Image: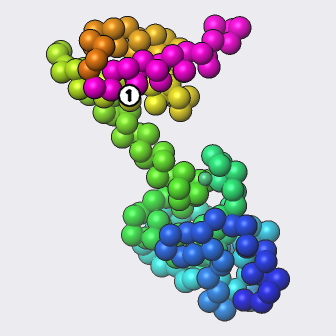
Amino acid sequence: MDMDQADEFADYLEHPRFGRGPRLTDLEPLDNWGWQYLASGPERIPHTGVRADPERHVNTFHYAVEYYFDLRRVCRDCGRKFIFFAEEQKHWYEDLQLPLHADAVRCVGCRKAERGIAWLRQRYEELLAMTSRTAEETLELVGAGLTLVDEGLFGFRVLEHMRAILKSVPSGTDGADEMRGRADDLLARVQAPNF
Ligand SMILES: [Zn+2]
C-alpha cells in the first residue's frame, strides 16, 4: 500500500486478526456496474476484492454477490472507524450463513461488549427467578442489575429494586458495602429533575 493509503487508515481500529489497514489483494474486477458486489461507492476500498461463493449464500438479492471488498465503517457505539474486511464477510455469509443484508455496524470490541451484556442480562434473569439465594448470589444479582442500569438497559425502577434486595444482605458481608456504594453512585446520577 502506498503512503497516502497508510495515512488514511492510521486512525482506524486495529482488528485482532486482520490488523489496521486494508488487505490488498489486487483483485479489482473491471466491471464497475456494482451489482455483483455487496457495496459500491466510497465505503468500498479498491483492490481488496475477495471472490465469493454465491452457492453458499443463504439468500440473495436479485443478483448474485460474486465479490467482497474491504469496507469502511464507523462503529455505531464508539464512533470509531474500522474496516469490515472482505475475509470477514466471506466468513459471515458463507461459514456462519448470515443473511447478506447483515452488516457490521459495530467494531469488534463493541460486538464483544454487546455479547457480554447479553450474557449478563441472561444471568440476571436466572438469579432473579431463583426462589432463594445465598448472600453471594444476591450480590451477584445486584451487581448484574447495577451494571445493566449503568449500561442503560434498565431504568430507575430496577435500581430501586436492587437497593431493596441489598437491604436483605447484612452489612459486613463481603462486597455488600461496595454494592451499596455503587447503587448510591448510580442513584445520584439518575436523580435528574425528571425522576
Ligand atoms: Zn466500537
58 with respect to 84 (left or right): left
The residue positioned 54% from the left and 51% from the top of the image is 110
For the point 73% across and 67% down, the residue is 11
Residue depicted at 59% across the width and 62% down the height: 61
Along the line of sight, the residue nearer the viewer: 31 or 177: 177
Residue type at mark 1: give it: Gly
Instruction: Provide the residue span drawn in magenta.
Output: 174-195
| 153 lies left or right of 162 | right
Tell me if I can see residue 165 in this picture.
no
Provide residue 140's location: percent of width, then percent of height.
30, 28
Nearest the viewer among 73 and 154 is 154
Q: Residue at x 55, y 69 (%)?
A: 15
Left or right side of 174 for 21: right
- Would you identify the image quadrant in which residue 171 lies? top left
Q: Quadrant of the C terminus?
A: top right
Verify whether residue 32 appears in magenta: no
Q: Quadrant of the N terminus?
A: bottom right
Q: Is residue 193 magenta?
A: yes
Residue 30 shows in this picture:
yes
Magenta stretch: dominant secondary structure: helix
Query: Residue 136: x, y in percent?
Result: 23, 26
Are there few (<14), some (14-19), or many (20+) residues within 10 Å of tag 1? many
Judge by depth and name the residue closer to the eye, 163 or 151.
163
Judging by the rendered image, the residue that carries numbered circle 1 is 143
Horizontally, is 99 left or right of 11 in the view? Answer: left
Image height of 122 relative to 139, above or below: below
Colour treatment of the image: rainbow
Q: Which secondary structure lies at badge 1? A: helix
**In the rendered image, the vertical position of residue 146 relative to residue 187, given as above or below:** below
- Please state which of residues 103 and 178 is positioned toward the viewer in this rendering: 178
The x and y percentages for residue 141 are 32, 25
